Image: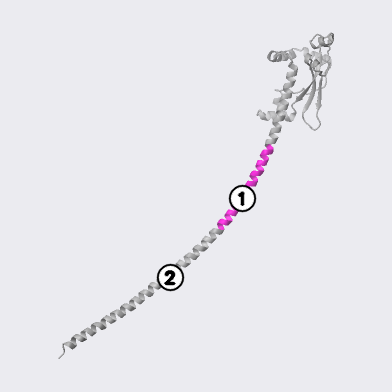
Amino acid sequence: MDDKVKAAITGHPADRIEYPPAFFTLPMPGSSDSHSVVGIPASIEDYTAGASMRDGFGNLESIFPVDHLSDAELRDVARLLGLDDGEGVSNSVLVPRDDCSEWPPRVFQDVVDSTRAKRELASLVRAFGCERLAARVFGTSTALHRAVKELREFQGQLNESALKNVKRVAELMIELDNVRSGFAILSNFWDDQFQLVRKQLDHKASEHDRDFKRAAQDHEREARVLQAQVDSLSQENGDLRVSRTGSRRGP
């Protein structure tokens, strides 16, 4: 390996390079996602793997692709966290600064040398260490972007499935209404038939009752006539007996 390259990678460059690390925003056509290419401190592994490199801030840089959350994705994350909008989320996750224009080398050097920047970097290094820190930070942004993208696709599929279910429920409700309507018509038909048969039975029962009463009256009338005849015959029979008795007693 070239000694100059090795020295640059290991953090001992021959001449200090003052310009900032690479950062290029690449908006993808037809997508709201923001894709960037950044420069991170190059490692021996990057060099041996043939990664794209360039002169960077103090050392060689390895070109590293990064995915950032779009505004729409930030709003989705805000909804998941119960926030009103994506502004609160953008202050809590890794998003590119609003002004992505290249900083002049001297301005960037002043920012890096500022106490504020050193304190922020110190917090990160204390918690996560400095080994491949930039790669892991950018990797976290990409991982979050991909996770939210997967979630949005899943929600889209879920919404599509829910829409299909709603349509199916609507179809079933229509079928149920048709069944209810048909049942009501059928029920009314059989109710009318029942009422008709009931009227017919009531009419026949009334006729039978009337015929029974008429037959009873005829029977009673015939019984009276027969009784009268029996009484008349009994009277005649009595009279005949009396006459016979009187005849036997005569001179």
In the rendered image, the quadrant that contains the N terminus is top right
Q: Position of residue 145 (x, y in %)?
A: 73, 26
Residue 94 showing in the rendered view:
no
Pointer 2 residue: 210
Magenta span? 159-188
The kind of residue on which mark 1 rests is Asp
Q: Residues within 10 Å of mark 2 (few under 14, many from 20)?
A: few
Q: Is residue 176 magenta?
A: yes
In the rendered image, the quadrant that contains the C terminus is bottom left
The kind of residue on which mark 2 rests is Arg
Question: Residue 51 sits in which quadrant?
Answer: top right
Pointer 1 residue: 177
**Left or right of residue 206, residue 76 in this image:** right
Q: Is residue 91 magenta?
A: no
Q: Residue at x 69, y 36 (%)?
A: 157
Tell me the chief SS of the magenta region: helix
**Left or right of residue 167, residue 57 in this image:** right
- The CA distance from mark 1 to mark 2 is 48 Å
Q: Position of residue 200 (x, y in %)?
A: 50, 65
Residue sticking out furthest to the left:
251
Q: Looking at the image, is 61 positioned above or below residue 159?
A: above
* Mark 1 touches mark 2? (CB < 8 Å): no
- Mark closest to the chain's N terminus, 1 or 2: 1
Q: Secondary structure at mark 2?
A: helix
Q: Position of residue 88 (x, y in %)?
A: 69, 25
Q: Position of residue 111 (x, y in %)?
A: 78, 15
Q: Residue at x 74, y 29 (%)?
A: 71
Residue 248 showing in the rendered view:
yes
Q: Residue at x 80, y 12 (%)?
A: 9
Q: Residue at x 76, y 25 (%)?
A: 67
